[in-house]
Image: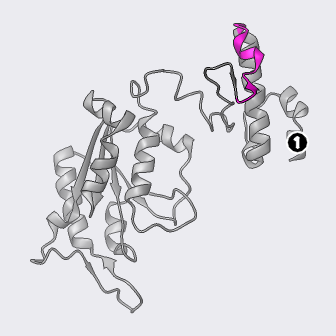
């Protein structure tokens, strides 16, 4: 899978995503991450990419021309117009299901805004998806883009060493992940639940399912309303009362 990030700070993207699981996946050829410097496409001799907003107001606005030219050059290399995402609080919130859907794409382009935003005209020309990672404002779109790339990459076959890791984590079926334990069996007076050391896989899976539901009910009751539960589980955990 190929990710392209249109940004004013390419080193920020490359330095972060070139490490850990994502970096190793890129080394194996499972992913390709390219940060495209928008400044390389400005026609201004001082490499300026922003200007004052029409109508007045604080801050500066990223100009359409360098963004559009960077996009066109990228599309020419790719050979078609892939889904292009603008990171903005104005979009719907990014979710695990969205990560799964986007992981089916061969190529994705991310546009990272800065300053007071981006000229609306270029957004109308190139953007297919407006997506937010939360109801707050950041200094730029690079961090949201990297969050999305990390989450999407985990859904790409082969990126995770354990094939089940991507499908048995938090938010699968709108449930949080069950508690995890490792050695030693007792630490600081706290013991690992006996069922996890029983070797009975059926009982272990049943315990984990129960813990996921209980944890979701405690910390994210809003998720439990849409969770994939059986009729028996809904009655047992009082989901209808939420």
- Nearer the observer, 130 or 213: 213
Q: Position of residue 139 (x, y in %)?
A: 41, 69
In the rendered view, tell whether residue 63 sits above or below residue 159: below
- Nearer the observer, 194 or 120: 194
Give the residue at x 46% y 64%. Answer: 88
Answer with left or right where residue 61 lies relative to residue 168. Answer: left
Q: Secondary structure at mark 1?
A: helix
Residue 4 seen from this side: no
Residue 196 seen from this side: yes
Q: Position of residue 44 (x, y in %)?
A: 13, 77
In the rendered view, tell whether residue 150 sits above or below residue 186: below
Q: Which residues are magenta?
A: 188-200
Q: How many marks?
A: 1
Answer with left or right where residue 63 lies relative to residue 235. Answer: left
Quickly name the residue at label 1: 240
| Furthest-front residue in this view | 188
């Amino acid at each position: 899978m190929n990710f392209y990030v249109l940004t004013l700070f390419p080193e920020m993207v490359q330095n972060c995503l070139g490490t850990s699981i994502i970096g190793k996946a890129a080394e194996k050829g499972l992913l390709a991450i390219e940060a495209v410097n928008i400044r390389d496409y400005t026609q201004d001799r001082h490499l300026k990419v922003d200007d004052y907003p029409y109508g007045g107001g604080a801050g500066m606005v990223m100009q359409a021309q360098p963004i559009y030219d960077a996009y066109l050059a990228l599309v020419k290399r790719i050979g078609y117009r892939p889904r292009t995402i603008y990171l903005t609080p104005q979009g719907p919130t990014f979710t695990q299901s969205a990560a799964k859907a986007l992981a089916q794409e061969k190529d994705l382009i991310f546009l990272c805004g800065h300053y007071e935003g981006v000229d609306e005209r270029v957004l109308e020309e190139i953007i297919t998806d407006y997506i937010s990672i939360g109801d707050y404002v950041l200094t730029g779109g690079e961090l949201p883009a990297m969050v999305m790339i990390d989450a999407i990459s985990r859904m790409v076959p082969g990126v995770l060493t354990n094939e089940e890791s991507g499908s048995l984590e938090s938010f699968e079926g709108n449930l949080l992940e069950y508690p995890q334990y490792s050695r030693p069996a007792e630490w600081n007076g706290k013991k690992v639940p006996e069922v996890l050391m029983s070797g009975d896989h059926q009982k272990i899976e049943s315990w984990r399912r129960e813990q996921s539901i209980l944890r979701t009910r405690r910390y994210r009751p809003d998720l439990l309303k849409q969770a994939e539960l059986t009729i028996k589980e809904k009655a047992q955990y009082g989901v209808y009362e939420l």
